Image: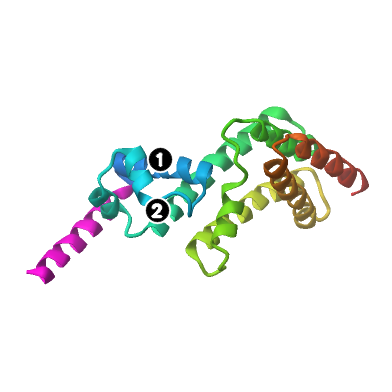
């Protein structure tokens, strides 16, 4: 009887997982978890809190996600897509010329830093809370940073940089430092400081 029940539950989970991306309930769970993980951290946010905030039963959650770690990965993937979509548009609306867009990345960061929901970078926080590089959560954080770098490389190429990869690395380092400083100090000033440093870097490039 127990074996049959376990087989039924496993089949039920795979059925739900297969339809997960189209499930409103799954999307709702991911949206609530993303907000809670962003605002409170990963270890500090328990499953019971997510269930209470989402109004979803525990059985339903585990039909979509086999573990909290799996839910964290899904939340990070969603946050990655949402944040990069916003970031690209925020940069493009601030500047038209390629050179100006390289500096506009810091203007976009400043806009982010003054928002009430800014609690640092969710991916930096994830890498800190799950430091093992082999962790799927840590790998998702690395993936996000690589995709952001690709965007900056594209901007550097459009600006005619002789070494867009190296320039992107320098600019991303300034971006990451500004994010950590803004989270630590609660001030948007690090974005302005990083922008000034980037302007000097571009002038000498």
The residue range painted magenta reads 1-20
Q: Position of residue 114 (x, y in %)?
A: 66, 31
Question: At 40% across and 40% down in the image, what residue appears?
Answer: 32
Residue 183 or residue 152, whichever sits in front: 183
Q: Which residue is mark 2?
A: 71
Q: Position of residue 29 (x, y in %)?
A: 35, 43
Identify the residue at the far top of this view: 93
Magenta-span inclusion, residue 189: no
Residue 83 or residue 65, whichever sits in front: 65
Identify the residue at the far left of this view: 1
Q: Is residue 203 above or below residue 12?
A: above
Question: At 79% across and 57% down in the image, what residue appears?
Answer: 166
Q: Which residue is mark 1?
A: 32
Distance (Cα) linking label 2 and label 1: 11 Å
Residue 129 or residue 163, whichever sits in front: 129
Q: Is residue 67 above or below residue 181?
A: below
Is residue 144 in view from this perspective? no
Q: Say what secondary structure mark 1 lies in.
A: helix
Query: Dot 1: few (<14), some (14–19), or many (≥20) neighbours within 10 Å?
Result: some
Number of numbered labels in the structure image: 2
Q: Quadrant of residue 94?
A: top right
Quadrant (top left/top right/bottom left/bottom right) for the N terminus: bottom left
Identify the residue at the far right of this view: 204
Q: Say what secondary structure mark 2 lies in.
A: helix
Q: Position of residue 128 (x, y in %)?
A: 60, 58
First-in-chain label (2 vs 1): 1
Residue 132 in the figure: left or right of residue 68: right
Residue 38 in the figure: left or right of residue 164: left
Dominant secondary structure of the magenta stretch? helix
């Amino acid at each position: 009887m127990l074996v049959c029940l376990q087989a039924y539950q496993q089949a039920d989970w795979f059925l739900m997982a297969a339809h997960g991306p189209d499930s409103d309930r799954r999307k709702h769970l991911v949206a609530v978890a993303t907000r809670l993980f962003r605002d409170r951290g990963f270890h500090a946010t328990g499953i019971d809190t997510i269930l209470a905030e989402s109004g979803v039963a525990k059985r339903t959650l585990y039909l979509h996600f086999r573990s909290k770690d799996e839910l964290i990965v899904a939340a990070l993937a969603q946050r990655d897509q949402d944040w990069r979509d916003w970031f690209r548009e925020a940069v493009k609306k601030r500047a038209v010329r390629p050179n100006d867009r390289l500096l506009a990345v810091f203007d976009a960061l400043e806009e982010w830093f003054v928002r009430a929901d800014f609690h640092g970078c969710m991916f930096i926080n994830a890498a800190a809370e799950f430091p093992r590089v082999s962790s799927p959560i840590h790998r998702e954080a690395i993936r996000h940073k690589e995709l952001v770098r690709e965007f900056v490389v594209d901007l550097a190429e459009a600006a005619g940089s002789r070494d867009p990869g190296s320039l992107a690395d320098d600019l991303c380092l300034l971006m990451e430092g500004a994010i950590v400083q803004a989270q630590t100090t609660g001030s948007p000033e690090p974005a302005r400081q990083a922008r000034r440093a980037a302007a000097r870097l571009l002038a000498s490039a």
